[in-house]
Amino acid sequence: MTSAAVIPPSEPPLSEGARVINTFFAPSKTFKDINRSASWWLPFLIILVVSYAFIYVVDKKVGFDKVTENSMRASPKQMDQIDSLPADQREQRMAMIEKFTKGITYAFPMIGLLFMVIMALILWGSFSFGVGAQIGFGKTLAIVVYGNLVTIVRAILAMIALLAGASSDTFTFQNPVATSPAYFIDSAAHPVLFALGAQFDITVIWAIILVAIGFPYVTKVKRGTSIAIVFGWWALLVLISVGGAALRA
């Protein structure tokens, strides 16, 4: 008489809320569950809500006139050109730039989805054709969106700082709070160093790590290979960013 093989029970499916929470505290559970469902609407909705809440706080506590001025000060050549204009023309130019800045800022959270789709396409091609991983685009996008969910931490910290009375004199959307070395670097005096430091934002690195460790739970790709692919693309973006800053300097 032989006993039947014991089949270990499969892990119970996670709710959408549990997947979001586990992204921060037990990401392996979230990424394993993506094999069951590639749904990504909730983390994106959370990113959207937090982003617009952040923009609203900035609008009320800093003002887009100050945001525009601070941003322009980071480009001394451009600011010098505007300062050289007659007072009425300078006012009109700054008002136009402020209007554009406000418009693009309120559109950016939705544009962020396009960026994540592009990121997912690049990674899907890299894993599918580069190392022969069997993964669909939907699951790739889910990994990318869940990985980027942790970047809301920066926005939340920035909102807390502004609501607590942080100075608006140096506020920029690029570095709203001290989560990267760039926060402590004068962008006008050291544009290349500033561009480099901005790429090492803690929340961005956290997101990249999550995306890198997510693929092995959905494919048979080894973790080292996944890390090499994801961080390889990030390194390329760093070079492009720093190179662009060097050309503009």
Image (cartoon, grey):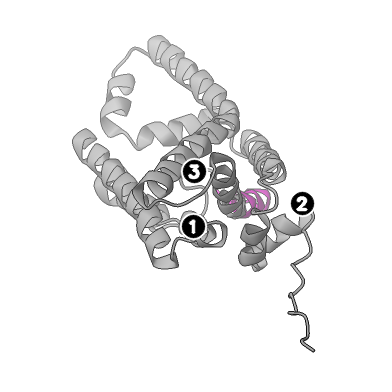
Q: Residues within 10 Å of mark 1 (few under 14, many from 20)?
A: some
Quadrant location of the C terminus? top left
The residue at which mark 1 appears reads as 178
Distance of label 3 from label 2 (alpha carbons): 40 Å
What amino acid is labelled 3 in the image? Asp
State whether residue 16 appears in this view.
yes
Q: Which numbered circle lies on residue 48?
A: none
Q: Residue at x 68, y 46 (%)?
A: 43
The magenta stretch is: 155-167
Quadrant location of the N terminus? bottom right
What amino acid is labelled 2 in the image? Glu
Q: Are the residues at dot 3 and dot 1 in contact (C-beta closer than 8 Å)?
A: no
- Label 1 element class: loop
Is most of the magenta stretch helix, strand or loop? helix
Q: Earlier in the sequence, mark 3 or mark 1?
A: 3
- Label 2 element class: helix
The residue at which mark 2 appears reads as 16
Front one among 95 and 145: 145
Q: Earlier in the sequence, mark 1 or mark 2?
A: 2
Whether residue 110 appears in magenta in the rendering, the answer is: no
Q: Residues within 10 Å of mark 2 (few under 14, many from 20)?
A: some
Could you say where residue 116 lies in the image, as x and y percent from the top left? Answer: 52, 39
Compared across the picture, whether 142 is left or right of 84 comes to right
Which is more foreground, mark 1 or mark 2?
Answer: 2
User: Vertically, is 52 above or below 142?
Assistant: above
Could you say where residue 50 lies in the image, as x and y percent from the top left? Answer: 68, 43
The residue at which mark 3 appears reads as 169
Q: Residue at x 70, y 53 (%)?
A: 36
User: Vertically, is 211 above or below 88?
Assistant: below
Distance of label 3 from label 1 (alpha carbons): 15 Å
